[in-house]
Image: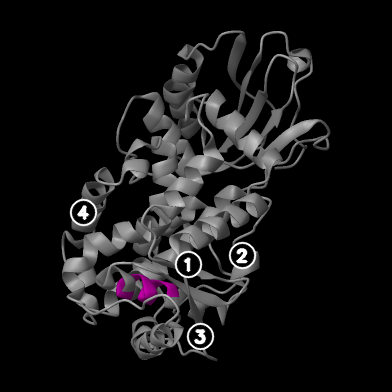
Amino acid sequence: MLRLLAACLAFLTGCRGTPPARGETPELSRLVDSMRPVVERATGQKFKGPTRSALKTRQEVRTFLLGKLEQDFPPSRQEGVEAVYRLLGLIPDSLDLKKLLLDLYTEQVAGFYDPEAATLYGVIGADPTELRFVLAHELVHALQHQYLPLDSLMRIKSSADEQTAVQAVLEGQATVASILAFVPDRNILRQPGFWEMARDQVKTQAASMQVFSRAPLAVREGLVFPYLGGAAFMRWWDSAHAGQPLPTLATMPRSTEQILHPVRYAKGDGPVQVRFADRAGDALYEDTFGELEIQTLATVLRGGGEVLTGTPIGWGGDRFRVYRSAAGPALVWYLVWDDETSAARFRGTSGVRLLAAKRAGYRTAVESVAGRSRPTIRIVIAPTQWSQWSRLPELANRE
């Protein structure tokens, strides 16, 4: 995904040079060291120590990323994520999500930072202009790692939505800083139309990337959002928190709603805790969607091509589980809303479309849940003969 941003902003950099050849790690080290002061000026933060760097071939990168995917996306999680995405119509039934992600991550990659090894890697054969831009971006991550525990932050287990929000902060700062590393005038980021132009360039470049252009909308949106959505949030953060380059662990945004609508973050409008009453038991997978994925789902259901996130949807929190059954996976999803108007809007749009999306051998239910402190909707998409239709999993008494 960094290649997208490198391409859409390359006209700003005007950088040229020869990329390091195989085995010439000292040359890469000199390049990295020469860019550290530039990154410090762009972020307003100082490096606390040296930055390790190394070169990898594209095949080595693919092998490395495959290992990371196996670690962070084990078979049980893959099965659960694929099940819920298929049931909601976000991906086709035949799609191998892990293979797609590996192909996407390795498509013309130029460099990356590995928090576990605390090492910045350049890819042999990368375009020189692209490499410099990517190294600036990844140097920001190396700098962030000296102030925040990146490795643990990127492995938040309880909520994929919160993890996406954290990723948006980190990638957003790196995106803004890597632009400022080459164009130090911060006013360029505030010029009318700048980010609209960047988004258009991203779309144009994405169309030329074979793997990315063929990926489902939900996958494409999930990959691009941390960079562009995160950059928009960090531009707001910079204007609202002068002298504080990054949120702390205690003040880190907790939802994509807060990233999409910073005023919600400023007001302390965090997600409510939504919990099932019983233990996971025979559940295959459990997680949270959040506003970004709900907006993406709404776009897919109405047949749209662009996810429009400018208007808050009144999301308060959500939680879903996927259960195994002999006839196929079963989804139980609870959504909590800020008010009745928001809940009714969802039921009348996405709810109606989910009911209309027939799946052979399956039954869908979209209904309000009585007795909750906030308006709550339950969605069930499960095989017709699922044994738990008569005793659906319930929420805990408190949200």
* Residue 268 seen anywhere in this rendered image of the structure: no
Q: Secondary structure at mark 2?
A: helix
Residue 69, percent from left and from top: 60, 51
Residue under label 3: 51
Quadrant location, the N terminus: bottom left
The span from disc 3 to disc 2 (Cα, nearest Å) is 20 Å
Residue under label 2: 153
The span from disc 4 to disc 1 (Cα, nearest Å) is 22 Å
Viewer-side label of 2, 4: 4
Q: Secondary structure at mark 1?
A: helix
Answer whether residue 136 is magenta in the image: yes
Q: Secondary structure at mark 3?
A: loop
Residue under label 1: 170
Viewer-side label of 3, 2: 3
Residue under label 4: 201
Mark 3 surroundings: few (<14), some (14-19) or many (≥20) residues within 10 A: some
Judged left or right of residue 385, residue 240 is: left
